Image (spheres, rainbow, N blue to C red):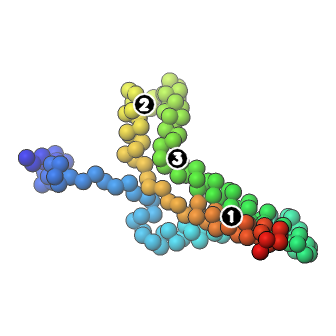
Amino acid sequence: MSVADPQYPGKDLSKESYEEPALRSESEGAGASARVILLIIYTVIGLGLFFLSAALSGLFQAEGQAVYHILSDSFLLPAVLLGGFGALGYIASQGFFDLFRYAGHILWSGFRHPKERFTNYYDYKDHLASERKRWLPDMLLVGLVFLALSIGAYLIYRGMV
């Protein structure tokens, strides 16, 4: 049995021919070049944090084993920030914070007139899931690279390498 879409008369919406749209990211349209640009941006941010931390810790005046101690600490700052924000992005993309958003939506709907009213949490969660974008692991990956560099510098500092 064929079901026609009223918005597009020639389109068949039967279960056999209809496919759910996949979750898309903002950078998916541009392809791999947008992902490379994101990786470069996150790397530059991480390197900026690293050099700021290293300069404030006195890396350029330090000697001997203290250099590796400062390197370890300086690599750890962008690792924690970028890796932490990347992990939070993953958790948010899975809908973990939807209940808090729904509570805020209910609270604020008493003060203003929302464009969309949801009768229950399930409808609100379905609405958010239909608009959710795909999670991009770029920030987390850059954070993990900085973590690996921090661990390497720490192992050298402790004399284990």
Q: Earlier in the sequence, mark 3 or mark 1?
A: 3
- Could you tell me which residue is drawn at 49 percent across and 38 percent down? 98
Name the disc covering residue 24, or none.
none
User: Which label sits on residue 121?
Assistant: 2
Q: Earlier in the sequence, mark 2 or mark 3?
A: 3
Q: Check disc 3 and report the residue beneath it.
A: 92
The residue under label 2 is which amino acid type? Tyr
Residue 23 spot, x, y in % from top left? 38, 54
Which amino acid type corresponds to the residue marked 3 in the rendered image?
Answer: Ala
Q: Mark 3 to mark 1: distance in Å?
A: 22 Å
Crowding around mark 2 (Cα neighbors within 10 Å: few <14, some 14 to 19, many 20+) is some
Percent from the top left, x then y, of residue 56? 85, 64
State the residue lying farthest toward the top.
110
Task: Please tell me whether mark 2 or mark 1 is closer to you in this view.
Answer: 1
Name the residue furthest left. 1
Element at label 1: helix
Residue 51 vs 80, above or below: the answer is below
Picture coordinates of residue 61 (x, y %)?
Answer: 92, 73
